[in-house]
Amino acid sequence: MTNVARSAEVQRKTEETEVLVRIELDGTGNRQIDTEIGFLSHMLTLFSVHSLCNLTVTARGDVKVDDHHTIEDIGICLGEALKEALQDKRGLNRYGEATVPMDEALARAVVDLSGRPCLVFAAPLENQLIGNMSTENVKEFFRAVVNAAGITLHIDVLRGENTHHIIEAIFKAFARALKTAVSFEPRIEGVWSSKGLL
């Protein structure tokens, strides 16, 4: 186990958005979230609480157009911050899995800190809008995180009716799966791979 703080800060500024993400993997769930997209801020709060990562996210974007650019760019920044904070991945569990209920909804997330970006997203979301957030952009958020972080992530909704509940279960499951994946296995000196490299 390393004594080096596993944290990172990423800033991204384009003609469409301005985003700041700061993450500390070994935190207590402290967070400051301000995205202009209320439901996404709520989901990122849940992510911080259930991953125990300390998280700061501030974002301003062209939400008068729609929410896509802001959501995607937050995902990119979060993924880049995760990748930087993970350092060389020595001694990490690497894999994490969590199945989380939210009332009638049940979602499973499985994470591999593989270095290979891959998203499998099996989550029917019937309502197209929650607050000012397009639910189709939930997948775009996770695609951005996965591609920027270089991780494999499988998300499966096992059941559910209420779209809010389904998405909340997804974010909580992802957070808890990631918490397991980034935790340390003291018997592993290098990276947990037969190739010796992730």
Image (tube, rainbow, N blue to C red):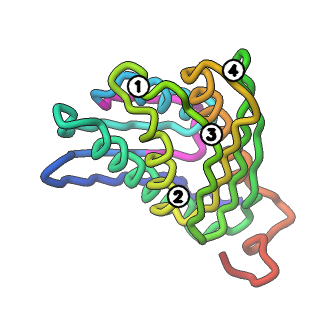
Residue at 18% x, 37% y is: 65
Q: What residue is pinned by disc 4?
A: 102
The span from disc 1 to disc 3 (Cα, nearest Å) is: 15 Å
Tell us which disc is closer to us: 4 or 3: 3
Q: Amino acid at mark 1?
A: Leu
Quarter of the view holding residue 198: bottom right
The residue located at (34%, 54%) in the rendering is 10
* Magenta span of residues: 23-35
Question: Which element type, helix, strand or loop, lies under badge 2?
Answer: helix
Residue underneath mark 3 = 123
Question: How far across and how far down the image is residue 67, in percent?
Answer: 29, 36
The alpha-carbon separation of the residues under discs 4 and 2 comes to 24 Å
Q: Which residue is mark 2?
A: 146
Give how far apart the Cα atoms at labels 4 and 1 are. 19 Å
Residue type for callout 4: Met
Residue 85 place in picture, x, y as percent: 51, 57
**Badge 2 amino acid:** Val
Secondary structure under tag 1 reads: strand
Asked whether residue 121 is drawn in magenta, I would say no
Pick whichever, 44 or 28, lies toward us. 44
Which image quarter holds the N terminus? Answer: bottom right
Q: Say which amino acid is labelled 3.
A: Ala
103 up-or-down from 193: above or below: above
Dot placed on the residue nearer the N-terminal end, 4 or 1:
4
The residue where tag 1 is placed is 129
Whole-Å distance between the Cαs marked 2 and 1?
23 Å
Q: Residue at x 59, y 64 (%)?
A: 118
4 or 2: tag closer to the N-terminus: 4
- Identify the mark nearer the N-term, 1 or 3: 3
